[in-house]
Amino acid sequence: MIALPPLSYKFLLVLVSARGQVVSTDQLAEKVWQKSYVSDETISQRASLLRKALADTADSYFEAIRGTGYRWVADVVLLSSPASVTAPSADSRQMAKVHKALLAVAVVAIIAALLAAYVVQRTPASTAASSKPSQPLSDHDLLLQKAKSYAAQFNAAANPHAIQLFRDVLALDPGSDSAKFGLAVALLHQVSKFNGDPTLLQEAEQLSANLLAAQPDSARRLWLRAFYFDVLGQINQAIALYEQALVQDGHLTEAKGGLAYLYRQKGRLHEALHLNMDIVGTELHYQFLQVAECLALAGLTKQAREWHQRAYQLAPDSAVVIAALARFELTEGKDEAAAKLLTALHNKGMGSAQSYEIAAILALRQQQPQQALALLQQAASLRPESEYTEAWLSWFLRDTQQQQPLQVSVEDWPDLWVYRAISLLASQQRQQAIEALQLAQRSGYLDYRFIQQLPLFHQLDGEAAYQSTLQAMARAADSERAKIEIYVLPKLNGLIVPAK
């Protein structure tokens, strides 16, 4: 059953009534909108909404005539003489005349669409149920539906459309909590996943704070606020809010996923995996990726590779998935495999700041500093405010520019201490760099294998404090591995068939 909003119904009626003939944009403006002028963009959007409602994806019902208008091309069977195709008004007598003039089209989907909007429905639960016409979707509801559809695609091309559509909904209905929530999530994804402008966080902050203030015990609103602090980099605040969300709703998938990710950042690998096991059955590549990264940090390389490959199978064009797999290959010393993945991604024009950073590390390992610098500059162009890229650039430009070490606080991500160490080495502050690595270790950072693969840290190999820090990371990783092998791995092995 398909319901059409008034404008879409008028649009459909005008096209069907002129079946086989081109209806110009001027005629559509006059007959559908009752205006002398309507922009091509507005008309095109209405046509798109109608196609979506009718599931018309291949011009099977009506076609666009470039620079002119639209033409109905499907067969039409006339059931009654067509009345005037003047757009329906509020006058009930005029509306009745329009309803009588409906044309039955020889396509089942079109019949269903028209009947759904105007045929009386009976409630089967009552033997004496009263007749009630179904309500057509409003423009507000259609826009909201379309915005959610774009957001659900979760890619760099669709997400900006989702943001704009959520804003369009709020222009029609400023009080729509659903649109506010959807817009906040899309803004946060734009910044965290799709190299978006960090200033978008200001709007997300206001939306998430206001929504939570209105319903402070809402699990989903607690999750949204946690997600904001997560993207902002205030990891401890984000963890506390994710945990509060799960107190309110222990089954909230989004909160489990966010908390699992942050537990991994803090070195709490077996806890992260327990949370991921609850949601991994959803077949989301992001959850597979989190499992893979936890297993890799614990030194369970074989299992980590299986989960990485499964994530890649689910999302072969995801920059996040490919960059993570390339980083895994780099950590395992498989530079050629990592480079192959990144080259294919970048040739498609789908690279991210993270993927270009990893490519730069590979170039540095191959003693190609100029290529590495060019790749880092590409990363900086995608994410100008990235502390990670800033730290690497400070290392490459150490001989030509005076460098300021990266500033990090206890609220920040543990891996930022590693990047502070890089920036300190750029200004020859070796002891302070080791202290930064010690703070990374105490904050829960476990990826000592990655540090060992970075050529610039080799100058510290003879430092006892440096080796002691890496050994502390390794011991913590081994402790997590033991718990995972006993309590988690047997259950994980039953969740996935190894990728071939």
Image (cartoon, rainbow, N blue to C red):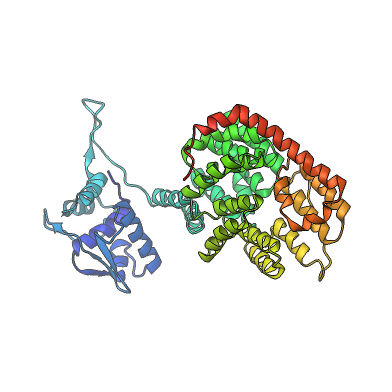
Left or right of 170 in this view: 326: right
Image: 38 above or below 452: below
Q: Quadrant of the N terminus?
A: top left
Residue 310 visible in this rendered orientation of the protein = yes
Image: 79 above or below 478: below
Q: Position of residue 162 (x, y in %)?
A: 48, 54
Residue 187 visible in this rendered orientation of the protein = no
Image: 114 above or below 485: below
Q: Residue at x 26, y 46 (%)?
A: 117
Question: Toward the viewer: 63 or 269?
Answer: 269
Left or right of 462 in this view: 491: left
Question: Toward the viewer: 270 or 227?
Answer: 270
Question: Toward the viewer: 289 or 74?
Answer: 289
Quarter of image, res 42: bottom left
Q: Residue at x 86, y 54 (%)?
A: 430
Q: Position of residue 415 (x, y in %)?
A: 72, 48
Left or right of 215 in this view: 414: right
